[in-house]
Image: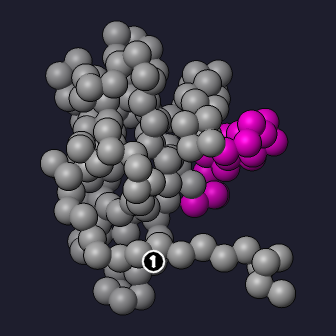
């Protein structure tokens, strides 16, 4: 997998559970999502299930997991190929600015490069300017606007 300075990126393993859970809780807190251990456990279960579409990379610095990138393949009917969707990217605040996020994205690009026509896509919050500073260097910003609907609200 990829390396950036002193950051190593690799696929997640069962031994990463405790640290992944800490980082994923930090991700959820950053985005002001409710603390919910059931969600954290569900996602961890998905990542450990080889039949599930969700996968993850982790970044290590000085022998410690300091970042995560939860991702999945998704079909793209408009182009007739598949893309790698980055669902969650999070770096331990103690090591931000040291290339962890960049290394995780490079790891995803390496995975996508193995499939002809594949790309890596993701969204971020409009006010997440720190992340956008990196994203503007490693990808291009699209013109697409994202919408969500809750079936309970649509009735």
Res 18 visible: yes
Tally the numbered discs.
1
**Front residue (pair 108, 130):** 130
Where residue 42 sits in the image (x, y, percent)?
75, 46
For this view, does 73 lie left or right of residue 2? right
Residue drawn where x is 35% and y is 19% of the image: 95
**Front residue (pair 72, 127):** 127
Where residue 53 sits in the image (x, y, percent)?
57, 60
- Which residue ends up furthest to the top in the rendered image? 62
Residue drawn where x is 67% and y is 45% of the image: 33
Which color scheme does this rendered protein use?
one colour
Q: Which residues are magenta?
A: 33-53
Res 1 visible: no
> Mark 1 sits on what residue?
75
Compared with 106, 54 (above or below) is below
Is 44 covered by the magenta stretch? yes
| The image quarter in which residue 78 lies | bottom left
For this view, does 68 lie left or right of residue 155? left
**Front residue (pair 23, 127):** 127
Compared with 120, 153 (above or below) is below
Where residue 38 sits in the image (x, y, percent)?
81, 42
| The image quarter in which residue 140 lies | bottom left
- Which residue ends up furthest to the front in the rendered image? 127
Instruction: Name the secondary structure under disc 1.
Output: strand
Compared with 95, 82 (above or below) is below
Residue drawn where x is 29% and y is 48% of the image: 132
Label 1 neighbourhood size at 10 Å, few (<14), some (14-19), many (20+)? few
């Amino acid at each position: 997998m990829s390396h950036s300075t002193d950051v190593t990126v690799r696929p997640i393993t069962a031994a990463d559970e405790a640290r992944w859970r800490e980082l994923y809780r930090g991700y959820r807190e950053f985005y002001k999502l409710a603390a919910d251990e059931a969600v954290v456990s569900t996602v961890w279960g998905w990542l450990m299930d080889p039949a599930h579409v969700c996968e993850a990379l982790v970044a290590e610095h000085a022998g410690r997991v300091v970042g995560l990138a939860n991702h999945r393949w998704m079909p793209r009917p408009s182009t007739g190929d598949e893309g790698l969707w980055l669902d969650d990217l999070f770096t331990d605040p103690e090591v931000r600015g040291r290339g962890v996020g960049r290394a995780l994205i490079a790891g995803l690009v390496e995975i996508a490069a193995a499939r002809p026509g594949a790309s890596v896509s993701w969204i971020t919050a409009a006010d997440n300017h720190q992340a956008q500073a990196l994203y503007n260097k490693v990808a291009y910003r699209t013109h697409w606007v994202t919408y969500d609907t809750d079936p309970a609200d649509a009735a």
